[in-house]
């Protein structure tokens, strides 16, 4: 369930906003709260993300999510893989669009 796409998007959001809540993360990524929880736990379990409670936060369920050094390295690798896959999808889509355009062109 933790694909490169979700790994990339979650790590990107955490890097940009370490105090983001799981609920906000779910809303930003348009996925369920349960999926966010599962993905974060998987990233924490393999040492890519570290979670710690806010010291002076009255909401004791608030966490600060930080990419570990291994997480920063992994994010770079995931970003490269994700970009490669999206570029391939884009190229395939462009080719399909050109084929469709050719199909609707009037023939002389």
Image: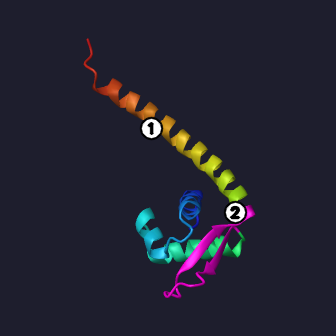
Could you say which is closer to the camera, residue 95 or residue 72? Answer: 72
Q: Residue at x 35, y 31 (%)?
A: 100
- At 53% from the left and 62% from the top, the residue drawn is 13
| Location of residue 42 (image quadrant) | bottom right
Q: Is residue 6 above or below residue 63?
A: above
Question: Which mark is on residue 71?
Answer: 2
Q: Is mark 1 on a helix, strand or loop?
A: helix
The quadrant the N terminus occupies is bottom right
Would residue 53 be counted in the magenta stretch?
Answer: yes
Looking at this rendering, what residue extends furthest in the front direction? Answer: 56
51 vs 90, nearest the viewer: 51
Q: How far apart are marks 1 and 2 (CA)?
A: 32 Å
- Which comes sooner in the sequence, label 1 or label 2? 2
Q: Residues within 10 Å of mark 1 (few under 14, many from 20)?
A: few
Query: Could you tell me if the residues under marks 1 and 2 are in contact, i.e. CB atoms within 8 Å?
Result: no
Residue 96 image position (x, y, % from top left): 42, 34
Instruction: Determine which quarter of the picture holds residue 99.
Output: top left
- In the displayed structure, 58 sits above or below 84; it is below
Magenta-tinted stretch: 48-70
Picture quarter with the C terminus:
top left
Question: Helix, strand, or loop for circle 2?
Answer: helix
Q: Where is residue 82 in the image (x, y as percent from the top left)?
A: 59, 49
Mark 1, residue position: 93
């Amino acid at each position: 369930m933790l694909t490169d796409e979700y790994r990339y998007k979650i790590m990107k959001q955490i890097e940009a906003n370490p105090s983001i809540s799981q609920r906000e993360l779910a809303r930003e990524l348009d996925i369920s709260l349960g999926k966010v929880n599962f993905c974060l736990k998987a990233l924490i379990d393999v040492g890519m993300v570290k979670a710690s409670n806010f010291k002076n936060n009255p909401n004791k369920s608030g966490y600060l999510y930080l990419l570990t050094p291994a997480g920063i390295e992994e994010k770079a690798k995931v970003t490269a893989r994700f970009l490669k896959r999206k570029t391939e999808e884009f190229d395939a889509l462009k080719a399909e669009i050109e084929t469709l355009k050719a199909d609707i062109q009037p023939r002389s």
